[in-house]
Amino acid sequence: MNRFIKLIIAASCIFSLIVFPVACGGDDAAEQKAPVKKAEATPAVKHEAATPVAQENAKPSPDKAIEMLKAGNARFVDGIPTHPHINRARLIQAGKENQGDHAYATVITCSDSRVPVELVFDAGVMDIFVIRVAGNVCDTDEVGSIEYGLAHVNTPVLVVLGHTQCGAVTAVTHAVLGTGHALERNIPPLVDNIQPAVKLAMSKHADVKGDAIVPYAIEENVWRGIEDLFMASPASREIVKSGKAKVVGAIYDVGTGIINWLPESKTTDILNTVEANPDRAMNAMAGGEHAAEASAGGHH
Ligand SMILES: [Zn+2]
Protein backbone atom coordinates (compact mmCIF):
# COMPACT_ATOMS: atom_id res chain seq x y z
CA MET A 1 0.00 0.00 0.00
CA ASN A 2 2.80 2.39 0.93
CA ARG A 3 4.42 1.86 -2.37
CA PHE A 4 1.08 2.33 -4.17
CA ILE A 5 0.45 5.65 -2.35
CA LYS A 6 3.97 6.79 -3.17
CA LEU A 7 3.37 5.86 -6.76
CA ILE A 8 0.12 7.84 -6.83
CA ILE A 9 1.82 10.85 -5.22
CA ALA A 10 4.69 10.56 -7.63
CA ALA A 11 2.31 10.21 -10.57
CA SER A 12 0.24 13.23 -9.48
CA CYS A 13 3.42 15.23 -9.00
CA ILE A 14 4.53 14.36 -12.47
CA PHE A 15 1.01 15.04 -13.76
CA SER A 16 0.91 18.44 -12.08
CA LEU A 17 4.41 19.21 -13.27
CA ILE A 18 3.51 18.30 -16.80
CA VAL A 19 -0.03 19.69 -16.95
CA PHE A 20 -0.11 22.72 -14.67
CA PRO A 21 2.99 24.49 -15.80
CA VAL A 22 1.72 24.15 -19.34
CA ALA A 23 -2.00 24.75 -18.71
CA CYS A 24 -1.87 27.26 -15.85
CA GLY A 25 1.74 28.19 -15.31
CA GLY A 26 1.97 28.62 -19.05
CA ASP A 27 -0.69 31.33 -18.99
CA ASP A 28 1.02 32.85 -15.99
CA ALA A 29 4.26 32.85 -17.84
CA ALA A 30 2.58 34.40 -20.84
CA GLU A 31 1.07 37.12 -18.62
CA GLN A 32 4.41 37.77 -17.01
CA LYS A 33 6.23 37.82 -20.27
CA ALA A 34 3.91 40.37 -21.79
CA PRO A 35 5.02 43.23 -19.55
CA VAL A 36 8.62 42.04 -19.85
CA LYS A 37 8.26 42.29 -23.60
CA LYS A 38 6.80 45.78 -23.19
CA ALA A 39 9.77 46.72 -21.03
CA GLU A 40 12.12 45.43 -23.68
CA ALA A 41 10.25 47.35 -26.35
CA THR A 42 11.84 50.66 -25.35
CA PRO A 43 15.48 49.68 -25.87
CA ALA A 44 14.41 47.68 -28.93
CA VAL A 45 12.86 50.79 -30.46
CA LYS A 46 15.97 52.78 -29.59
CA HIS A 47 18.01 50.13 -31.36
CA GLU A 48 15.79 50.37 -34.41
CA ALA A 49 16.12 54.17 -34.31
CA ALA A 50 19.90 53.80 -34.25
CA THR A 51 19.94 51.60 -37.33
CA PRO A 52 18.80 54.21 -39.87
CA VAL A 53 21.43 56.57 -38.38
CA ALA A 54 24.10 54.15 -39.51
CA GLN A 55 22.45 53.84 -42.90
CA GLU A 56 21.80 57.52 -43.56
CA ASN A 57 25.19 58.02 -45.14
CA ALA A 58 23.64 59.31 -48.33
CA LYS A 59 23.60 63.09 -47.93
CA PRO A 60 20.28 64.88 -48.31
CA SER A 61 19.81 67.23 -51.24
CA PRO A 62 20.28 70.96 -50.50
CA ASP A 63 16.50 71.45 -50.39
CA LYS A 64 16.02 68.44 -48.13
CA ALA A 65 18.75 69.71 -45.79
CA ILE A 66 17.02 73.11 -45.59
CA GLU A 67 13.76 71.29 -44.84
CA MET A 68 15.50 69.39 -42.02
CA LEU A 69 16.81 72.65 -40.54
CA LYS A 70 13.37 74.27 -40.79
CA ALA A 71 11.68 71.26 -39.19
CA GLY A 72 14.25 71.20 -36.38
CA ASN A 73 13.73 74.91 -35.69
CA ALA A 74 9.96 74.41 -35.68
CA ARG A 75 10.34 71.66 -33.03
CA PHE A 76 12.57 73.96 -30.98
CA VAL A 77 10.12 76.87 -31.22
CA ASP A 78 7.15 74.64 -30.37
CA GLY A 79 8.92 73.25 -27.32
CA ILE A 80 8.87 69.70 -28.66
CA PRO A 81 12.51 69.03 -29.51
CA THR A 82 13.52 65.41 -30.03
CA HIS A 83 17.18 66.03 -29.15
CA PRO A 84 18.40 63.66 -31.87
CA HIS A 85 21.88 62.20 -32.12
CA ILE A 86 23.05 62.94 -28.61
CA ASN A 87 22.97 59.42 -27.19
CA ARG A 88 25.91 57.16 -26.48
CA ALA A 89 25.44 55.23 -29.74
CA ARG A 90 25.90 58.49 -31.66
CA LEU A 91 29.10 59.28 -29.73
CA ILE A 92 30.51 55.84 -30.54
CA GLN A 93 29.57 56.42 -34.17
CA ALA A 94 31.19 59.88 -34.10
CA GLY A 95 34.40 58.31 -32.82
CA LYS A 96 34.49 55.79 -35.62
CA GLU A 97 33.00 57.45 -38.67
CA ASN A 98 33.67 60.43 -40.92
CA GLN A 99 31.59 63.53 -40.15
CA GLY A 100 31.58 64.11 -43.90
CA ASP A 101 29.20 61.16 -44.20
CA HIS A 102 26.71 62.68 -41.77
CA ALA A 103 26.76 66.45 -41.23
CA TYR A 104 23.99 67.98 -43.33
CA ALA A 105 24.63 71.70 -42.85
CA THR A 106 27.36 74.26 -42.38
CA VAL A 107 26.21 77.20 -40.30
CA ILE A 108 28.08 80.41 -39.66
CA THR A 109 26.55 82.53 -36.95
CA CYS A 110 27.37 84.97 -34.18
CA SER A 111 29.11 84.00 -30.94
CA ASP A 112 26.15 85.46 -29.01
CA SER A 113 25.12 83.13 -26.17
CA ARG A 114 21.49 83.51 -27.23
CA VAL A 115 22.17 81.60 -30.47
CA PRO A 116 22.98 78.01 -29.45
CA VAL A 117 23.18 76.52 -32.92
CA GLU A 118 22.45 72.82 -32.42
CA LEU A 119 19.64 73.61 -29.99
CA VAL A 120 17.83 76.05 -32.28
CA PHE A 121 17.89 73.46 -35.09
CA ASP A 122 17.10 70.57 -32.71
CA ALA A 123 20.21 68.81 -34.00
CA GLY A 124 22.92 66.78 -32.33
CA VAL A 125 26.38 65.32 -32.65
CA MET A 126 27.85 65.20 -36.18
CA ASP A 127 24.83 67.05 -37.66
CA ILE A 128 26.07 70.62 -38.18
CA PHE A 129 29.50 72.04 -39.05
CA VAL A 130 29.47 75.30 -37.08
CA ILE A 131 31.50 78.48 -37.44
CA ARG A 132 30.86 81.11 -34.79
CA VAL A 133 32.36 84.57 -34.72
CA ALA A 134 31.08 87.89 -33.38
CA GLY A 135 28.83 89.43 -36.02
CA ASN A 136 28.94 86.28 -38.19
CA VAL A 137 31.46 87.98 -40.48
CA CYS A 138 32.98 86.10 -43.41
CA ASP A 139 36.64 87.10 -43.24
CA THR A 140 39.60 84.90 -44.20
CA ASP A 141 39.48 82.36 -41.35
CA GLU A 142 35.71 82.07 -41.58
CA VAL A 143 35.76 81.64 -45.35
CA GLY A 144 38.42 78.95 -44.94
CA SER A 145 36.20 77.19 -42.39
CA ILE A 146 33.21 77.45 -44.75
CA GLU A 147 35.29 75.98 -47.59
CA TYR A 148 36.15 73.12 -45.25
CA GLY A 149 32.46 72.62 -44.46
CA LEU A 150 31.33 72.71 -48.10
CA ALA A 151 34.24 71.01 -49.87
CA HIS A 152 35.44 68.48 -47.27
CA VAL A 153 32.56 67.88 -44.88
CA ASN A 154 30.39 68.02 -48.01
CA THR A 155 27.41 69.65 -46.38
CA PRO A 156 24.64 70.34 -48.92
CA VAL A 157 23.77 73.71 -47.39
CA LEU A 158 25.48 76.72 -45.84
CA VAL A 159 23.39 78.99 -43.65
CA VAL A 160 24.65 82.49 -42.92
CA LEU A 161 22.66 83.09 -39.77
CA GLY A 162 22.41 86.60 -38.36
CA HIS A 163 20.33 87.33 -35.29
CA THR A 164 18.17 90.06 -33.82
CA GLN A 165 19.74 92.46 -31.31
CA CYS A 166 23.25 91.61 -32.56
CA GLY A 167 25.71 93.49 -30.35
CA ALA A 168 28.43 93.54 -33.00
CA VAL A 169 26.15 95.09 -35.63
CA THR A 170 24.79 97.52 -33.03
CA ALA A 171 28.32 98.57 -31.98
CA VAL A 172 29.29 99.23 -35.60
CA THR A 173 26.05 101.18 -36.11
CA HIS A 174 26.91 103.35 -33.11
CA ALA A 175 30.43 103.85 -34.46
CA VAL A 176 29.06 104.95 -37.83
CA LEU A 177 26.54 107.25 -36.09
CA GLY A 178 29.36 108.75 -34.04
CA THR A 179 27.83 107.60 -30.77
CA GLY A 180 30.17 104.66 -30.25
CA HIS A 181 32.70 104.15 -27.51
CA ALA A 182 36.33 103.08 -27.51
CA LEU A 183 36.88 99.51 -28.69
CA GLU A 184 39.57 97.07 -27.61
CA ARG A 185 42.40 96.96 -30.12
CA ASN A 186 41.45 93.68 -31.83
CA ILE A 187 37.78 94.44 -32.29
CA PRO A 188 37.94 96.93 -35.20
CA PRO A 189 39.63 94.49 -37.60
CA LEU A 190 37.09 91.85 -36.52
CA VAL A 191 34.02 93.97 -37.18
CA ASP A 192 35.29 95.98 -40.16
CA ASN A 193 33.39 93.61 -42.45
CA ILE A 194 30.17 94.85 -40.85
CA GLN A 195 30.69 98.55 -41.56
CA PRO A 196 29.81 98.43 -45.28
CA ALA A 197 26.59 96.57 -44.40
CA VAL A 198 25.58 99.23 -41.88
CA LYS A 199 26.33 102.03 -44.32
CA LEU A 200 24.38 100.30 -47.08
CA ALA A 201 21.39 99.84 -44.76
CA MET A 202 21.56 103.55 -43.87
CA SER A 203 21.70 104.63 -47.52
CA LYS A 204 18.79 102.34 -48.46
CA HIS A 205 16.68 103.54 -45.53
CA ALA A 206 17.65 107.18 -45.14
CA ASP A 207 14.41 107.86 -43.30
CA VAL A 208 15.24 105.38 -40.52
CA LYS A 209 17.06 107.11 -37.67
CA GLY A 210 19.24 105.99 -34.78
CA ASP A 211 19.08 102.42 -33.48
CA ALA A 212 16.03 101.74 -35.63
CA ILE A 213 18.44 101.01 -38.47
CA VAL A 214 19.96 98.04 -36.62
CA PRO A 215 17.47 95.39 -37.86
CA TYR A 216 18.08 96.52 -41.46
CA ALA A 217 21.83 96.47 -40.86
CA ILE A 218 21.58 92.94 -39.43
CA GLU A 219 19.94 91.68 -42.63
CA GLU A 220 22.36 93.63 -44.81
CA ASN A 221 25.21 92.08 -42.83
CA VAL A 222 23.97 88.61 -43.75
CA TRP A 223 24.04 89.54 -47.45
CA ARG A 224 27.43 91.15 -46.98
CA GLY A 225 28.74 87.90 -45.45
CA ILE A 226 27.51 85.93 -48.47
CA GLU A 227 29.08 88.46 -50.84
CA ASP A 228 32.40 88.39 -48.93
CA LEU A 229 32.33 84.59 -49.10
CA PHE A 230 31.72 84.50 -52.86
CA MET A 231 34.32 87.23 -53.50
CA ALA A 232 36.98 85.31 -51.60
CA SER A 233 36.05 81.72 -52.41
CA PRO A 234 35.99 80.41 -55.98
CA ALA A 235 35.48 76.93 -54.50
CA SER A 236 32.25 78.01 -52.81
CA ARG A 237 31.03 79.67 -56.02
CA GLU A 238 31.69 76.49 -57.99
CA ILE A 239 29.97 74.28 -55.41
CA VAL A 240 26.87 76.48 -55.49
CA LYS A 241 26.86 76.79 -59.29
CA SER A 242 27.13 73.01 -59.64
CA GLY A 243 24.05 72.58 -57.42
CA LYS A 244 26.00 70.50 -54.91
CA ALA A 245 25.15 72.97 -52.16
CA LYS A 246 22.95 75.98 -51.52
CA VAL A 247 23.84 79.11 -49.57
CA VAL A 248 20.96 80.67 -47.67
CA GLY A 249 20.65 83.69 -45.44
CA ALA A 250 18.51 83.67 -42.30
CA ILE A 251 17.94 85.66 -39.14
CA TYR A 252 17.37 84.13 -35.74
CA ASP A 253 15.04 85.95 -33.34
CA VAL A 254 16.62 85.72 -29.88
CA GLY A 255 13.27 86.45 -28.21
CA THR A 256 11.14 83.81 -29.93
CA GLY A 257 13.59 81.20 -31.27
CA ILE A 258 12.06 81.64 -34.72
CA ILE A 259 14.36 81.67 -37.74
CA ASN A 260 13.31 84.01 -40.51
CA TRP A 261 14.56 82.48 -43.78
CA LEU A 262 15.58 85.12 -46.28
CA PRO A 263 14.84 84.71 -50.01
CA GLU A 264 17.13 82.21 -51.75
CA SER A 265 16.89 84.24 -54.95
CA LYS A 266 18.94 86.98 -53.31
CA THR A 267 21.87 84.55 -52.94
CA THR A 268 21.70 83.89 -56.68
CA ASP A 269 21.67 87.64 -57.37
CA ILE A 270 24.76 88.11 -55.19
CA LEU A 271 26.54 85.21 -56.88
CA ASN A 272 25.80 86.66 -60.32
CA THR A 273 27.05 90.08 -59.21
CA VAL A 274 30.27 88.58 -57.83
CA GLU A 275 30.79 86.52 -61.00
CA ALA A 276 30.81 89.83 -62.92
CA ASN A 277 33.24 91.47 -60.51
CA PRO A 278 36.85 91.47 -61.78
CA ASP A 279 38.10 91.79 -58.19
CA ARG A 280 36.79 88.37 -57.16
CA ALA A 281 39.37 85.75 -56.18
CA MET A 282 40.05 83.36 -59.04
CA ASN A 283 42.35 80.55 -57.90
CA ALA A 284 40.18 78.05 -56.10
CA MET A 285 43.05 76.06 -54.64
CA ALA A 286 45.70 77.06 -52.12
CA GLY A 287 49.38 76.92 -52.94
CA GLY A 288 52.35 79.24 -53.11
CA GLU A 289 53.46 80.82 -56.36
CA HIS A 290 55.57 77.77 -57.09
CA ALA A 291 52.59 75.47 -56.60
CA ALA A 292 50.46 77.73 -58.82
CA GLU A 293 53.18 77.73 -61.46
CA ALA A 294 53.53 73.97 -61.23
CA SER A 295 49.80 73.39 -61.65
CA ALA A 296 49.54 75.94 -64.46
CA GLY A 297 52.80 74.76 -66.05
CA GLY A 298 51.18 72.99 -69.00
CA HIS A 299 49.16 76.02 -70.01
CA HIS A 300 52.04 78.43 -70.60
ZN1 LIG B 1 25.65 88.97 -32.62
Image (cartoon, helix red, strand yellow):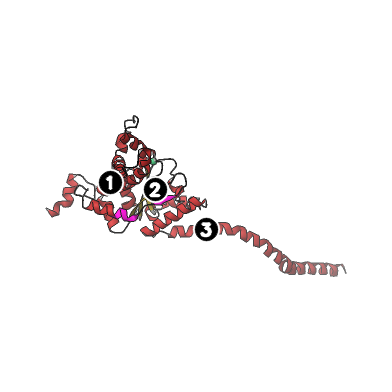
Query: Which of the numbered marks, if any, corresponds to residue 47?
Result: 3
Q: Residue at x 82, y 69 (%)?
A: 8
Identity of the residue drawn at 77% across and 69% down: 15
Q: Could you say where residue 114 lies in the image, as x and y percent from the top left?
A: 44, 42
Read off the residue under disc 1.
Answer: 228
Mark 1 vs mark 3: give the one in front. 1
C-alpha gap between disc 3 and disc 2: 36 Å
Q: Are marks 2 and 1 in contact (CB under 8 Å)?
A: no
Q: Residue at x 46, y 53 (%)?
A: 72
Q: Which residues are magenta?
A: 255-268
Q: Is residue 152 left or right of residue 84?
A: left
The N terminus - image quarter: bottom right
Q: Residues within 10 Å of mark 3 (few under 14, many from 20)?
A: few
Tell me if mark 2 has few (under 14), some (14-19) or many (20+) residues whose alpha carbon lies within 10 angstroms of its own. Answer: many
Residue at point 34%, 50% (across, down): 149
Q: Amino acid at mark 3?
A: His
Label 3 with label 2: CB-CB less than 8 Å: no
Q: Is residue 105 magenta?
A: no
Considering depth in this image, is 189 or 118 the residue closer to the camera? 189
As rendered, which of 9 and 149 lies closer to the eye? Answer: 149
Binning the other alpha carbons within 10 Å of mark 1 as few (below 14), some (14 to 19) or many (20 upward) gives many
The spot of residue 163 in percent (x, y) is 40, 44
Q: What whole-number distance in Å separates the C-alpha atoms at marks 2 and 1?
A: 18 Å
Q: Which mark is residue 293?
A: none
Task: Give the mark nearest the N terminus, 1 or 3.
Answer: 3
Secondary structure at badge 3 equals: helix
Secondary structure of residue under mark 2 = strand
| Mark identifier at residue 251 | 2
